[in-house]
Image (cartoon, rainbow, N blue to C red):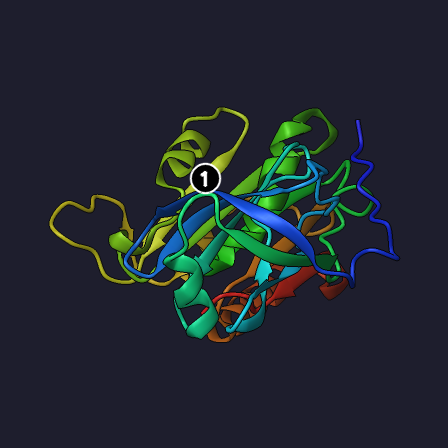
Amino acid sequence: MSCNCESNKEDVYVPEAAIIAVNQPMTAMENFFDIQFEGGKDLGHMPGQFVEVSIPGYGEAPISVSSSPDKTGSFEMVVRRVGRLSAAMHNLPVGARIGMRGPFGTPFPVDDVMKGRDVLFITGGIGLVPVRSAIQYVLNHRDQYGKVTILYGTKTPADRLFVDELQAWGGRDDVTYMETVDCGDDAWKGNVGVITTLMPQVDADPDKTTVVVCGPPVMISAVLRMLDQLGVERHNIFNDDFGI
């Protein structure tokens, strides 16, 4: 089943009222939000797209959508506190109204290019936020894709997002999941090192694999060099520097 998520192009530039259904801290810097439109409609996004969020008196900012388009009735975002609008959003109570425009941006090609192929997700830090939408979509339609591999890296264990979901991915027998941290702590038992230290463990056929990369620019540059060495053609790699 493919997702029919075409937006009404006449509406995406007009702000609509949306309601915060959940506002929950995830890390010291990031909060998780579940958002509902007042009229009850679905956002109509595809994985990898973003919305423009506005708060009166604080302006407007682009924020990635983190949930699969399969989720109906609401959608999810993770907001890092980096400026006036994001700080104001962190302080809003459940039930508060915000303005929403979108979705915008080029989505990951989950319904055409990636379908029927092996998929390798490589993501660092907050780069997981937009990629999670694609991961969820692929796993929701698991029989339409080949081998699925997920690599995730953060600076420290405290920076990991969606911890329960990471554990669930690691427990699946139809997913290869690996993660690392740049600097561990006494409780961390996993890999320590930058995300490229995981890549030699990846079993990927360069002719059959589509790669999604999202994270800080320095991470993306290092990953692209290694993918070149593995023989993955650039037209099979989709990347963005959402991560900070």
Percent position of residue 67, x then y:
58, 42
Whole-percent x and y of residue 106? Answer: 75, 60
Q: Residue at x 78, y 35 (%)?
A: 3
User: Which quadrant holds residue 53?
Assistant: bottom right
Q: Position of residue 18 (x, y in %)?
A: 61, 48
**220 and 47: which one is in front?**
47
Location of residue 220 in the rendering, given as x and y in whole percent from the top left corner = 54, 69
Disc 1 residue crowd, few under 14, some 14–19, many 20+, Cα 10 Å: many
Residue 220 lies, with reference to residue 203, above or below; the image says below
The C terminus lies in which quarter of the figure?
bottom left
Mark 1 residue type: Tyr
Residue that badge 1 annotates = 177
The one nearer the camera, 138 or 86, is 86
Would residue 63 be found to the left or right of residue 88 on screen? right
Q: Measured along the vertical axis of the image, is residue 128 above or below residue 68?
A: below
Image point 56% across, 56% down: which residue? 98
Please give the count of numbered marks on the rendered protein: 1
Question: In the image, is 102 to the left or to the right of 53?
Answer: right
Quadrant of the image containing the N terminus: top right
User: Residue 153 sits in which quadrant?
Assistant: bottom left
Instruction: Give the camera-side residue of 133 and 21.
Output: 21
Q: Is residue 231 visible?
A: no
Residue furthest toward the left? 186
- Judged from the image, the secondary structure of the residue bearing numbered disc 1 is strand
